[in-house]
Amino acid sequence: MADEGVVAEEKATLTVAAIGDLHVKDDHSAPYRELFGEISREADVLVITGDLTDLGKPGQAKILAEDLRACSIPVVGVLGNHDFECGCVEEVTSILKDAGVRLLDGEVTEVDGVSFVGVKGFAGGFGSRMLGSFGEPAIKAMVAESVSEAMRLENAMRQVRTQRAMVVLHYAPIAETVAGEPLEIFPFLGSSRLAETIDRFKVSAVVHGHAHCGAFSGHTPGGAPVYNVAMHIEKPSGRPYALLEI
């Protein structure tokens, strides 16, 4: 797939600032303008891992779009479950893309020799406790959605033509980075199907959000590093965003 984000020059190391779960609300006034300016000085790329808005309202997307004017580096992102709440996802997507966000939904974009591959992901659970397609149609529909997201991730990964790639998700691909959340909600925080897909490819790093009380880092069974960058998670940077060298 042709992509207008391709940059000819390749950097030996790309500094990525990754953050998720901004949850911009209606009554927010320039909530992230200063932070985006700071990130522009610290990193080469900003990655946002979903839940950009609190309720998926176009007005909330416009507030975020205005703040992103302070960001002078490329911005890559995916949507989260909150961004679907009001049924205005197409308008929200349009607003953010018009603001320059490379909003990925089963697609790839490239910055300085690093590919960014993005899907929202979905729920389903982890490991031997992953939900199976059995029983009521509602359960089968839920599993089908989880499988569909994993397949869309695989199709996107097959488009990668660079040596380095970062996977951008909202839902978690492993249980390790949701540890700290109540066990009862683990199945709703992500799915091992995403990790199974990731481990079929060479991946430099994976970032996700969604689990506000999870853990910062872990690995897929195949060894790919995974980072929960929800802004509520304590990070080595000491800031709401993680700084990752790719």
Image (tube, grey):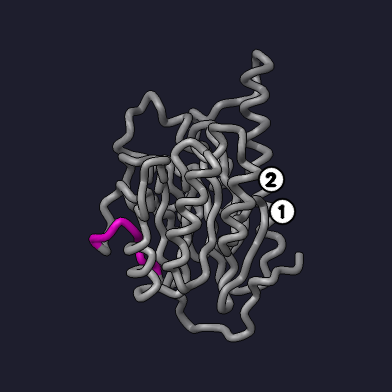
Residue, x 67% and y 25% (percent of image)?
A: 141
Residue in the foreground of this view, choosing between 138 and 78: 78
Could you tell me which residue is drawn at 71 percent across and 63 percent down? 159
The single residue placed furthest to the right in the displayed view is: 1
Please say whether residue 232 is visible from this viewpoint.
Answer: yes
Q: Position of residue 17 (x, y in %)?
A: 40, 65
Front residue (pair 120, 65): 65
Q: Confirm whether residue 218 shows in the render.
A: no
**Is residue 51 rendered magenta in the image?**
no
In this view, 133 is above or below 126: above
Left or right: residue 120 compared with residue 70: right
Q: Secondary structure at mark 1?
A: helix
In depth, the one of 167 and 107 nearer the eye is: 107
* Residue that badge 2 annotates: 151
Quarter holding the N terminus? bottom right
Could you say where residue 70 lies in the image, as x and y percent from the top left? 42, 67
Residue 220 shown left or right of residue 211 in the figure? right
Amino acid type of the residue that numbered disc 2 sits on in the rendered structure? Met
In the rendered view, tell whether residue 161 sits above or below residue 117: below
Q: Are marks 2 and 1 in contact (CB under 8 Å)?
A: yes
Residue 155 got which mark?
A: 1
Task: Farthest residue to the top: give it.
Answer: 136
Q: Residue at x 37, y 55 (%)?
A: 30
Image coords of residue 86 (percent x, y): 56, 32
Q: Secondary structure at mark 2?
A: helix
Q: Tag 1: residue type?
A: Asn
Image coordinates of residue 244 in percent, x first then y, are 39, 67
Query: Tag on residue 115?
Result: none
Which range is magenta?
A: 238-244
Number of marks drawn: 2
**Compared with residue 152, is residue 157 higher up or lower down, i.e. above or below?**
below
